[in-house]
Image: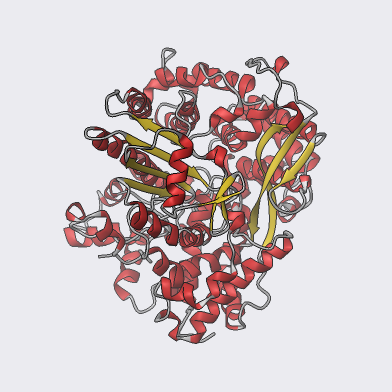
Amino acid sequence: MNNNDITKKDIYIAYKKAKFEIFNDKNTFKNIELLKFEENLVTNINSLYEKLENNFEDIEIGGFFEFPKSLEDKEEDKEKVHFHSNSLNHNKLNQKSILNFRKIIDATIEFHIISALWIMKVGQYIDQKFDSNIYGARLYRVKPINIDECSSDDLIEQPFNIDSPRIFESYIHKYTSWKNNGFKKVRELHKSSSAIVITMDITSFYHSIELEKFKQEEFYKNFNLIDIFINDDMKKFHESFIDKLIEWNKFIKSDKGIPIGLSASPILANATMNEFDEKVKTNLNPSYYGRYVDDIILVFPDSGNLNNGQSILDYLVDKKIIEKKGKDYSYNGLIFKKSKQKIFYFDKNADLSMIDAMESEINSISSEWRFLPDIANRDSKLLKKIIDFKGDAKEFKDSFRKVDAVTIKRLGLAMVISQAHSLNRYIGAKNWYSQRKEIYEFIQNTLFIPTNFISNYSFILRIFKLMMHSKDIKIAYCFIQKIFKLIDELNEIDKKTVIGDCDYENFRKYNSLALKEIFIETFDFLKSDKKDFKYIEKIINFLFYEKNKKEIFDKFLENVSKSNKLEGFKLINKNLFLRDLSFDSFAKFIVKEKLVGENIKTQKLLENINIDDIKNIFYESDEEKLKLLEEIESIINIKNTALIFPTRLFSGLDISIILSKKDKVTKKEEYIKIVKLLRGEVN
């Protein structure tokens, strides 16, 4: 590959973006791999550059994990009498159940970098083709100075923000906009007409996508890639990347599909639906069309003869949006199961109480989130929303198409976990232990019901992180034992996966890796209390020695003396912290040091890392940015890769605190440049 097409600087930028995305993906656990990669960053980047020059030779993609999806009754048990109970005694594992998994990619760090590089070189132009009605996985673009005067479509025309560590826009912002804009359009339409709302869902969407079409001339024309691919080397890079995805499919014994867990995949997924998007707008001209990856909301007026669900689906067929396929529906090989398409009819002569209730409940949680002390009170409204939950796992779906009250409970649980971490920072974990214990009791009684455990497995991992962050070490030790016990029990029932054979050991491996990384990430090397040491050692022995599969942690365990394990793990956590890979933000720590006065003891822990070679490449031909970075290093007295490759960004307030007592930065223009440099923003 020609050196002018992809430079070493490009690869450093791609690493910065890949690191940020990997760290902030709640289902990806690669901090130890990132640490190993960054410890020899220059060597590893040079090696990857050479492999790209040799057309992807020797580039390893990685393996896969089995990720739990659902636990359901076999066909013969689906007619049983429905009995709901919140007692664990009434919810033992049904041996006639089937455990469903989906495969997610366990990509190497190199391949994560290549994925980010593909987005920089190709994917950004594909994303620019989508209009503002496509909400999911939109790229983070440069924000204009007059942003308030810009429409959503104007913002899409902005260039991809290469400087920022971010690849995508905020999930919360785009997801809530997708839903709220749907609510708004229903209300507007209902003033003059009966409104029809359809929420559509594609079955096994990622696993149904054909990869070969991304190498065809028609695809290049549709997304204006012809000009980019005038250079044969860039076209070869794109096609080599797609070929690697095809190679991974063969590895998991599938003839199609894009990998879940890779940054490039949602862009390819959106590209797959582009023709569908255009057809909906042209043939149907709905009052509102919004798509969040494979979740679709359609709002349109009743034409006068749409009086039941079947007639509405037939109407979509007549408009050539979908076509009949047996008892279900399809579009270009993608399956819309009839049972998953939800249709709501709002008569113009009736009220909108259902919409009002949905919106009110969501807004109440969003409002309560602003008041951090709420959860620390025994009468917490938000806590009650979680404690009062009763129901089975199928009711946990947080989607517009599930409009019952229980929908909000999963959103509420996510908010409680996030809010709990914030409370630990602001008022201290010790000051609201009894309220936090109530959350744990709820979890023991509800999320360890087998169906709930599987459907909400990612929450189980987040709760363990909360326990570690809160220094509830004894509870955390008992908690992980319960996790492993239930996972052992689940191995006794039938299992299936969307593609290929189910490898249950790969689920065990994922669970073990996740818990180990969470432990190391949250093991605070500055604040470990002696009273916690007993159960910290128990967790270490249980996770890293009794349950250790002799994998990625071998290198670190070799350097951990069995007679002094705590010191060894403190060192690992410290190394993660220095690269902004631990639970505690490197940026926030620096700010705190400036607020309370620089502590000599803690300053010594912040070892300077020689990053001169990295800086010179990363900011080559940009002397102004290089000078600014060196200025920042002198102000905070730290040279560190975390300043160039952050996983959490400095806020404007953070930077103002850091610079507040320095005379070196007095001009507004210089301050703005420093803020933009650290936050990865450009004019």
Query: At x 74% / y 54%, what residue is drawn?
Result: 500
Give the percent coordinates (x, y) of residue 563: 77, 41
Q: Give above or below for 404 relative to 279.
A: above
Residue 347 occupies which quadrant of the picture?
top left
Residue 536 occupies which quadrant of the picture?
top right
Total numbered labels: 0
Pick the front one: 74 or 115: 74
- The C terminus is located in which quarter? bottom left
Q: Residue furthest front?
A: 305
Query: At x 39% / y 77%, what residue is drawn?
Result: 620
Residue 610 appearing in the image = no
Give the percent coordinates (x, y) of residue 213: 55, 70
Pick the front one: 328 or 288: 328
Q: Give above or below for 530 relative to 53.
A: above
Instruction: Report the colour scheme.
Output: secondary structure
Give the percent coordinates (x, y) of residue 2: 51, 87
- The N terminus is located in which quarter? bottom right
Compared across the picture, whether 94 is left or right of 660 comes to right
Give the percent coordinates (x, y) of residue 180: 33, 38
Query: At x 39% / y 69%, what residue is drawn?
Result: 125
Residue 301 appearing in the image = yes
